[in-house]
Image: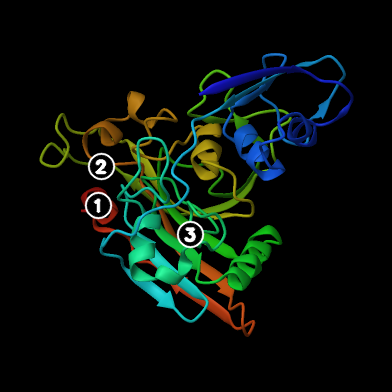
Amino acid sequence: MHTYTFTAPRPGRLDKTLAALLKDLSRSAVQRLIEQGQVTVNGQTRSASYQVKPNEVLVVSVPEAQPATAQAEDIPLVILYEDDDVIAVNKPAGMVVHPGAGNASGTLANAILAHAPETAGVGDAARPGIVHRLDKETSGIVLLARNETAYRALQAQFKSRVVKKLYLALCVGSVEPPRGIISKPIGRDPAHRQRMAVLIGGREAVTQYAVAEVYTVDKDLQDVAPGGLVKGSRYSFVRARPATGRTHQLRVHFASIGFPIVGDALYGATRHDPLSRALAPRHLLHASELTFQRPASGQEIHLYAPIPEDMRRVLDALGD
């Protein structure tokens, strides 16, 4: 990790200011560092669009460079859809999307290079064909491009919100109201760099949701959850549609209204909830459906990834 300290020479956007000061980094690379919480202004994290004032102190931490390209690995994939331009994969929980610190192999990027070698060099060399991401423990649909033209087209669809996504989540408690929109800005948590948080000055983040079912624990679940569950405890099975694509968006949003996703240790679910501690193998969030337009024809494609077995087991235990 290399740390650089600057005094802002003039007013302007944070990302533009740093791109001018750090000649070896592109503006997109600077934006990634800002998003990752590696940049502070007078000791505070800020968004890329923050208007820097003269003489403010800018501190930038730049991680050691990762290998320039991912390496192909013969890892089994569940392919939901593919054509000459696009591949859609049902990513299992536990698989990292692309190589990074501590995850040089075994990622979706490594697997896709073995399945479709032509993705090498599409977009970012370390993220071949990858136009969006899921967290390591989030399961479900990931869309990839086989060529640069498709990559740019899909990027544009995500940016203009043409791509529609549906997630399924199991939340702690009976979510109230049962249908609504959470519109709260999200940024890197200044006190905990691994977390995101609802922050004034963060990036716009909007989530529409509806509760599909509320489970009430009315029996002893000692057989499936060591220590059992408190009788009367409630859990909500929720369908969520994010209008934006911020890091950890659904996890942060549901935690912010008091109903964290079951199994989510980072956002507080395991602290007091016995189901999260004893039965949930991970945070129970699944990217279930995705709709996009084929880059070549504009044809609308709707994809569906069934609920994974680990999530189904928890739902079945609650519903018995």
Can see residue 184? no
Depth check, front residue: 69 or 303: 69
Q: Position of residue 294 (x, y in %)?
A: 58, 78
Lower position in the chain sequence, tag 3 or tag 1: 3
Q: Residue at x 56, y 44 (%)?
A: 177
Image side of residue 313 versus residue 293, left or right:
left
| CB contact under 8 Å: marks 3 and 1 | no
Q: Secondary structure at mark 1?
A: helix
The residue closer to the viewer here, 121 or 81, is: 121
Residue type indicated by callout 3: Pro
Amino acid type, callout 2? Pro
Residue at 52% across, 77% down: 85
Label 3, label 2: how far apart the Cα atoms are? 29 Å
**Above or below: residue 101 compared with residue 215:** above
Residue pointed to by mark 2: 281
Label drawn at residue 310: 1
Quadrant of the rendered structure where residue 90 is? bottom left
Determine contact: label 2, label 1, CB under 8 Å.
yes
In the figure, 40 relative to 284: above or below? above
Dot 1 amino acid type: Asp
Q: Alpha-carbon distance for marks 2 and 1?
A: 7 Å
> Left or right of 196: which side holds 108?
left
Residue occupied by mark 3: 128
